Amino acid sequence: MESVLSPLQTARYEYKPKLPEIYTHGMCGIIAAEGEPWLPSSDCEAIRNIFPHTFGMNRVYFRKGDNCAPKKKINAGVILSGGQAPGGHNVITGLYDALKEADPANRLVGFKNGPSGLLEGSCIEFTDDLIDRYRNTGGFDIIGSGRTKLETEEQFKIAAEVCAKLGISAVVVIGGDDSNTNAAMLAEYFVRENAGIQVIGCPKTIDGDLKNEGVEISFGFDTATKTYADLIGNIERDACSARKYWHFIKVMGRSASHVALECALRTQPNVCIISEEVEAKKTSFTEITEQIVRSVCARSERGDNFGVVIVPESLIEFVPELKDLIAELNDVLASKSEELAARAGWKKYAYLETLLSPSSYKVFTLLPSNIQNQLLMDRDQHGNVQLSRIETEKLLIELVRKRLAELKHDEIYHGKFSPLSHFFGYEGRCAFPSNFDADYCYSLGYNAFMLISYSYTGYLSTISNLARPAAEWRAGGVPLTGMMNLERRSGRLKPVIKKSLVDLNGAPFRYFAERRGRWAVETCYTFPGAIQYYGPPSVCDAVTKTLELEQTERMKKRG
C-alpha cells in the first residue's frame, strides 16, 4: 500500500535550498585558493608520524575566478556514518546535483549501512527519482548508517579494491569526529598506495562538538536543539500551568554540553548544569545537588513549588570523583569484561575491588545499585561507557529529594517537591531539517564536489560565516589531520579529531552565566515553539543562539 504524504512533507520536497552566492552563477567562475597550513593544536609530531602523506596541508578557499580544475569524469561514493543528524540527506542531494551539473555522465553511489557497505561493496546508484524522494527530509534512511570503524590495513585494502571494481575515484564520508578520523586514515592509505581515490569528509553531529577555527558548527545541531527546546518550552508551559512539578530533563551530548547550553539559552530554565564548568571547578555531586536545592528552596519561598532542570548526558563523566571511576572502568572492561561477566553477586564486586583503585571503588559502592549496573553495561564501539543509558537525571532527583528531606526535618524547608524525569535524545536526530540545516547541508555536499573537482583529498568540506544570510556564506575546506589529537581509547592512545567542549570564556557561556542567578529564582521561561519552515526569514532562517553569540563575538574581535 502506498503511503500518503503529509502536506508538509510534500512542501519540503519542493523547497530549494539556498547556496553561498559564489555557487549561484555556475561552476565556471570558481577557483580554489590556498591559505596557511592547518596544523594540530597538540600532539603535532605524533600526528605527523601517523599521517606523513596528508599532514601539513593548506586550508582551501573557493573564490570567484576562472575555473582551472582538470576536466574529468567523476564516479563518487558516499557514506553516512555514525548516529543520525537532520540534514544528512541534503548533503547527498547537494553532492548529487553538483556532480550532475558539472557533467551529466558523473555518477554517485551510496554505500549501504555505513562504512560496512564500502567493505562489502553493498551500494546503490542514485538517480533523479531516488534523490527527489529524499530532498529536505530527516533521517539517514536513503542508504542507512552504521558504526563500523575503518582503521586496519586490511580494511583499507578491501576499500581500495571495492572502489577500483566500481570505478569510484572519490569517497565522501558524512560523519562526526570518529567517522572523519576514519576518513583521514583512509585518505592517508589511498595517497600512500597511489590508489587514485580521493576522500572528503562532511561535519555531522547533533552534539555540536565537531567545531574549531575552521568549522563553525556541525550539521544537525541546529535542528536537534530547536526540537529539544520546543519540547522543553512545552514542559515549562505545563509546569507554569500545573504549578506542582519539578522536571529534570537530560539532553543528548556524549562528551560536551553544547546541546544543554543551547537549550538553556533558548528556554531559560531554573537550573542548567554545564559539565565543562563542573570539571573546571571540580564540583562534586554533593555541590551540584546543593545548587539545585537552593533553587528549589528559593522558589518555594515565593510559592513556586515547580521548576525545570536541564542536565547534559555527559555530566556523570565530568564530576571529578566519577570521572576517575569511569576512566578506570573503561580500562577494566576493555581487558577484563569476560572475567567480570562470569561472576555474579558479591563475587563480581569482590573481583571489581581488586581491579579498581581504593578511592574509585569507594565511590562505586556509594552509588545506587541501578547506577552501578548501568556503569557496568557493555561499552560502545570506542570502549567508553554508554552515557545515554545512565539515568543521571534520576540520580539527581534522589539526591535532591534526600537533601530536601533533611532540610524539612530541620524545619528549614517547608515546600513540596514532586519531581518528574525526561530524556530527550532520539526525538531530535531525524527531525525534518530546519531551513538552516537544509541549506547548510546542501551547501556542504555541493562544496564537497568542488573539493573533489580540484583534486583535494583528506579534507573536510566547510562552509563559514554561517550567522549571516546564506548568500554571504563562504566555502572551502580544512585538512582532516589538522584537527587531530591523541585520545585514550580502549586503553590505548589513538589519533582522533579533537572534540570541542563548551568554552567557559566564550560568549554563549558568559551570556548564560550572567543570567542564571535570576533564572534560578524567578520564572523566566521562554517558549521557542516548533521549528518554522515558512514565514519571515527572522523566524524561519534563524540560527542557534550559540552561533549567533559566537559570530557576534568574532566580529567584535575583528573590529
Image (spheres, grey):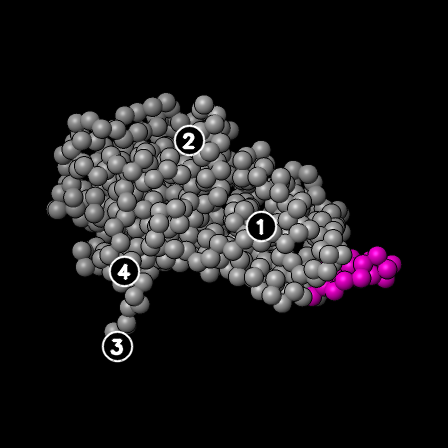
* Mark 4 secondary-structure assignment: helix
> Amino acid type of disc 1?
Gln
Q: Which residues are magenta?
A: 399-418
Apparent side of residue 91 relative to residue 176 in the rendered image (left or right): left
Quadrant for the N terminus, please. Answer: bottom left
Choose the circle earlier in sequence order: 2 or 3. 3
Residue 124 occupies quadrant: bottom left
* Mark 1 secondary-structure assignment: loop
* Mark 2 secondary-structure assignment: helix
| Residue identified by numbered label 2 | 482
Choose the circle earlier in sequence order: 1 or 4. 4
| Residue identified by numbered label 1 | 268
Apparent side of residue 340 relative to residue 485 in the rendered image (left or right): right
Residue at 12% in and 46% down: 105
Apparent side of residue 341 relative to residue 122 in the rendered image (left or right): right
Mark 1, other Cα within 10 Å: few <14 / some 14–19 / many ≥20: many
Residue 173 occupies quadrant: top left
Instruction: Judge by depth and name the residue closer to the eye, 206 or 486.
Output: 206
The number of numbered badges drawn on the structure is 4
Mark 3, other Cα within 10 Å: few <14 / some 14–19 / many ≥20: few
Label 1 – label 3 distance at C-alpha: 45 Å
Report the mark closest to the observer, 2 or 3.
Answer: 3
Instruction: Judge by depth and name the residue closer to the eye, 376 or 559.
Output: 559
Where does residue 98 sit, x and y in percent of width and height? 21, 43
Instruction: Judge by depth and name the residue closer to the eye, 54 or 206.
Output: 206
| Residue identified by numbered label 4 | 11
Tag of residue 1: 3
